[in-house]
Amino acid sequence: MKKGRASQKGGGTAQAELFGEETSSEMAEQKTRGSSKTSQLKVTKKNRTPSPKTPKSRGVHKVAKQREISVSEFFAKNRHLLGFDNPSKALLTTVKEAVDNSLDACDEAGITPEIHVAITQTQDDRYLVSVQDNGPGITPKEIPRIFGSLLYGSKFHRLRQSRGQQGIGISAAGMYGQLTTGKPMTIVSRVKRNKAHRFSIMLDTNTNLPVIKSDEEVEWESKHGTCVELELEASYKSGRHSVDDYLWQIALANPHVEIHYTPPKGDARTIARATKVLPAEAKEIKPHPRGVELGQLMKMLKDTRARNLSAFLQTEFSRVSGKVASEILAKTKLSEKTSPARAHRDAAESLYKAIQSTKIMNPATNCLSPIGDDQLIASLMERHDADFCAAITRPTAVYRGNPFLIEAAIAYGGKSFSADEPIKLYRLANRVPLMYQKMACAISKSVIDVAWRNYLVQQSRGAMPVAPMAVLVHIASVWVPFTSESKEAIASYPEITKEVKLAVQESGRKVATHIRRGRRLADQEKKKSYIEKYIPHIGIALQEILGLTDAKRTTTENNLKDILEKSRKL
């Protein structure tokens, strides 16, 4: 009997597992309410739809199908996020990422950059892209990860101005070429006084790791530098949003670079450098306490090597002296000798609030490398031959603890412009042209928001002004807030839009002064033409009325001209 009861109990347990907790509770009620309920339960069981898998087993089956995806696998399916959403844009993005890397490498090494870009059509829809620089080169150990892994680089954690930020660009271009042609990317690089290495690399999207197809030492004519070559499915076009236009704007934003360009159609050309002066070196700085969020602060408290909170604040942040650290900690209930690793969440939040309420000096500005007013004017004048050009550099400002500054330049008049078309707007971020998503960018929105009629420039409501003019706006920052991974537009932070608007307005006032001066000179020339036209007739009339000799008439005409010229406002 005990055995039967045990099996019955086990069967009840199995039934409970089979039908869930609700059925198990019903069975418990049967034992207390009698056999009439038992028959009712059997009906319920009979009417229940049979299922080959229980809810619990289905849940286990779903969990078994779940797996982690790599970042490269994600971007392989969402390559439009990186700027590879159509063939022509893919070609431009590939060249852009390679050139940006070359310029960064040369600037960091203090080398005047010389870049060779060659695009060769191999099939109707395929192009071979080659970009070579004279930079310091890359060690063989680092080449596979730099070109064969997404989100691998040295710029993400550094607070200093640089063109690249995320470590995605050139490896994403190689991934796109691999997806569309099945061919690996070829890299040749040489560090000074070492032999050159040629790598053939593909990217394993499942693991986000490089697959080295070949690695060999080769003879290379360049003493140092890097050459990247890859084939991809693309489309070449000239004009706006083209590789030609991009390289032209690169030279505009980087007047110290020389570019040798061989397009797939037409003759090779060279864009000469406008100056040999290298831009000021950007120094790395530590994060500003005002730009750190609570979660990041908690992580820093956990990872720091500082032994107490006072040392933590002074060593992990910029612009925090011993006096400022004491002032921050005085607003909390924390001791200066408290170990950062023992600070719990409430303590971190108290410290975070104290930081926000304490007056702290703005971040240092030596982490930025602006183009400069003189260079901007020289670049615009050389490429537009304008009648007038003005440039303004705003003082350094801060958003989310990140220092940034805005430069604006306006070129007005000349044969390069049409008076009946909207202005040409050049958007630059850390010396890199922004080619797409124009109307989604904070720069474009700020330029439209300027009341251009105050500066004698025509403008329809909510549209770009119409004038023979080019406007260039450059943002230099340790971290540019792009709206997407493709780095095509800048987010509309209030601090950024305010500075852009102020810079453009200041430049606009100079343009208005030039326009007024031009109108005044034109009016003066008009009056002068009247004098030269009518004075001789007046001289003849006076000669006839007064009986003057020819010599006296000439003297009278000269005197009248002098009087009228002096009466005009010059």
Image (tube, rainbow, N blue to C red):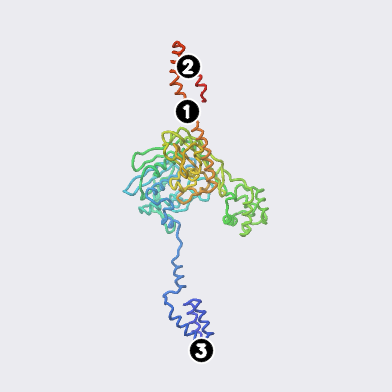
Residue that extends furthest to the left in the rendered view of this protein: 124
Quadrant hosting residue 78: bottom left
Amino acid type assigned to the residue bearing label 3 in the image: Met
Identity of the residue drawn at 45% across and 23% down: 530
Q: Position of residue 136 (x, y in %)?
A: 46, 43
Q: Secondary structure at mark 1?
A: helix
Discs 2, 3 touching: Cβ within 8 Å = no
Amino acid type assigned to the residue bearing label 2 in the image: Asn
Identity of the residue drawn at 44% across and 78% down: 48
Disc with the residue nearer the chain's start (1 vs 2): 1
- Disc 1: CA contacts within 10 A as few (<14), some (14-19) or many (>=20): few
From the viewer's perspective, is residue 58 above or below residue 184?
Answer: below
From the viewer's perspective, is residue 94 above or below residue 452?
Answer: below
- From the image, state whether disc 3 or disc 1 is nearer to you: 1
Q: Which residue is mark 2?
A: 558
Nearest the eye: 74 or 41: 41
- Disc 2: CA contacts within 10 A as few (<14), some (14-19) or many (>=20): some
Amino acid type assigned to the residue bearing label 1 in the image: Asp
- Mark number displayed over residue 523: 1
Q: Position of residue 296 (x, y in %)?
A: 57, 55
Q: Position of residue 295 (x, y in %)?
A: 57, 56
Cα distance, mark 1 to mark 2? 22 Å
Residue that extends furthest to the bottom in the rendered view of this protein: 1
Cα distance, mark 3 to mark 1? 122 Å
Whether residue 345 is visible to the viewer of this picture, yes or no, is yes
Q: Secondary structure at mark 3?
A: loop
Residue that extends furthest to the front in the rendered view of this protein: 545
Q: Position of residue 175 (x, y in %)?
A: 40, 53
Q: Which residue is mark 3?
A: 1
From the viewer's perspective, is residue 312 above or below residue 369?
Answer: below
Nearest the eye: 230 or 78: 78
